[in-house]
Amino acid sequence: MEGRMRLEEFSTKINACMSSSTACGLCRNQCPSLEFWGREARTPRGRMALCAHLLRGNLFPSPSLMEAMFSCILCGNCDAVCPVGAGPSRVIEAARERLVERGFLPSKHEERGSHVGREHNPYLESHAKRFSWLPGLNLPERAPLVYFVGCTSSYREKELARKVVELLGKMGLNFTLLKDEWCCGSFLLRTGQGRIDGRKVEEMARHNLEEVRKRGAKEIVVNCPGCYRAWKSDYPELGIQPEVEVLHLVQLLEREKN
């Protein structure tokens, strides 16, 4: 996937994190996986050390390394407190890509990744049921604003999706949905599966963007942080410019309040 940085390209940041003067461990106390696992290898600093050894050839892809990297929930707390801006969460994503390329991927992630390609969601659900949570809603074919619902809201947080639609209506906004909305691709990228079939993520991005164009929209609003990151950061990294303004629901509410 052109544009997505490989693990080697993070070597400067990894070295900065692991230098004797900055291996401070500020990230440790902010990491939920340390609280759960209680092991240094399950902290951002520990994972960065593993990445350093992997790059130096002192360590090789293995089931234990896979467990260390995939036990991170990518919350970003470490990024927020790192004094040298090493960005551990993005390095961990790159390490996951390296592991997946070498054949190390948790089986459940692999199963759900394959399902994304078939049914356009990682929840092992039918694409035909994506909007079953909102029957009988009459929305315009074209509108200046598209609510991109996302997989989690469509299949696991249906009440949230209904409330967002209700809220947008009460605000008097002219909006619509994508009749053929696909997964944004965040699941594949976060679990390291984007690089083994980068065209899959790009295909999803281009499909969703074309669906937005069909609606004549100038803006999309999302309530899912994964969808927001995909549209706002991941797509441009892949060389795909959304050409629409991407807003999180909180940003839209703040704007409309004023």
Image (cartoon, grey):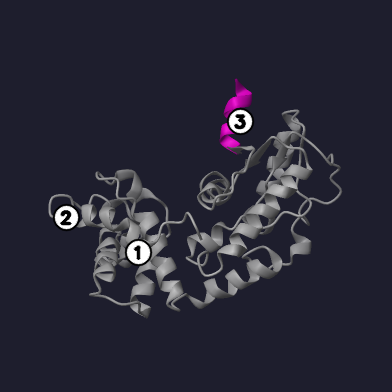
| Residue count near mark 1 (Cα–Cα under 10 Å), binned few <14, some 14–19, many ≥20 | few
* Residue at mark 1: 36
Q: Is residue 183 magenta?
A: no
Residue beneath the point at 54% across and 74% down: 110
Residue beneath the point at 67% across and 46% down: 148
Secondary element at tag 3: helix
Which residue is at the front of the view, 92 or 34? 92
* Residue at mark 3: 253
**Which badge, 2 or 3, comes first in the chain's sequence?**
2
C-alpha separation, residue under disc 2 versus residue under disc 1: 27 Å
Q: Mark 2–mark 3 contact, CB under 8 Å?
A: no
C-alpha separation, residue under disc 2 versus residue under disc 3: 43 Å
Query: Which one is in front in this view, the residue at disc 1 or the one at disc 3?
Result: 3
Secondary element at tag 1: helix
Question: Which residue range is magenta in the image?
Answer: 249-258
Snapshot quadrant of residue 52: bottom left
Instruction: Check the image and report above or below for 43 versus 177.
Output: below
Q: Mark 2: which amino acid?
A: Ser
The percent coordinates of residue 125 (x first, y second) are 70, 67
Snapshot quadrant of residue 66: bottom left
**Is 202 left, or right, of 145 in this rendering?**
left
